[in-house]
């Protein structure tokens, strides 16, 4: 069974889930971890979320807010489990790209890499893009 976790500092995880539920309802069952919002250490919040998961049998896809952050670092110790994927830098285009492309079976790392590359194309400095488009129209 596939398990999806959004984990972040403060409320980014639950906010992203809320937005995803609005844009693409019923896409996936998602557990959220809004770290540092309670008195529980982040390690305990993660353990609590993972205790409902069979790390040896389930596929787990974890999206965290930033590489090198404490939330992301606390998931690294789980990478030795089969079918455990940890993705840093979660945002709506990335989550949509990955979740809407999930196969019926286990996700292959190359599929995940391709979806991440596609989502990176959505990060754009719009000022430059508008100027580029205006220049292209002037050239015609």
Image (cartoon, helix red, strand yellow):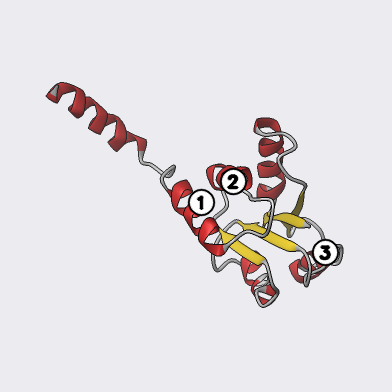
- The residue closer to the viewer here, 29 or 65, is 29
- Which numbered circle lies on residue 101? 2
Residue at the spot 58% in from the left edge and 49% down from the top edge: 98
CA separation, marks 2 and 3?
22 Å
x%, y% of residue 128? 28, 37
Q: Is the Cβ of the residue at disc 1 closer than 8 Å to that at disc 2?
A: yes
Residue at the spot 59% in from the left edge and 66% down from the top edge: 69
> Within 10 angstroms of label 1, few (less than 14), some, or many (20 or more) residues?
many
Residue at the spot 48% in from the left edge and 47% down from the top edge: 119
- Which numbered circle lies on residue 53? 3
Q: Is residue 54 left or right of residue 82?
A: right
- The residue closer to the viewer here, 51 or 11, is 51
Mark 3 element type: loop
Q: Is the Cβ of the residue at disc 2 closer than 8 Å to that at disc 3?
A: no
Mark 2 element type: loop
> Which callout, 2 or 3, points to the residue nearer the camera?
2
Q: Is residue 23 above or below residue 43?
A: above
- Labels 2 and 3: the sequence-earlier one: 3
Picture quadrant where residue 61 is located: bottom right
């Amino acid at each position: 069974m596939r398990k999806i976790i959004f984990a972040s500092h403060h409320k980014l995880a639950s906010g992203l889930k809320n937005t995803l539920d609005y844009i693409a309802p019923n896409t996936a069952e998602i557990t959220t971890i809004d770290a540092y919002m309670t008195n529980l250490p982040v390690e305990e919040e993660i353990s609590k979320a993972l205790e409902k998961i069979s790390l040896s049998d389930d596929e787990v896809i974890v999206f965290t807010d930033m590489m090198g952050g404490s939330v992301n670092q606390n998931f690294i110790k789980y990478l030795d489990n089969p079918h455990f994927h940890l993705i840093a830098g979660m945002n709506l285009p990335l989550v949509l790209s990955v979740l809407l492309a999930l196969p019926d079976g286990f996700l292959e790392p190359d599929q995940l890499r391709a979806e991440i590359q596609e989502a990176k194309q959505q990060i754009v400095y719009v000022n430059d893009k508008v100027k580029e488009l205006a220049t292209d129209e002037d050239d015609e």
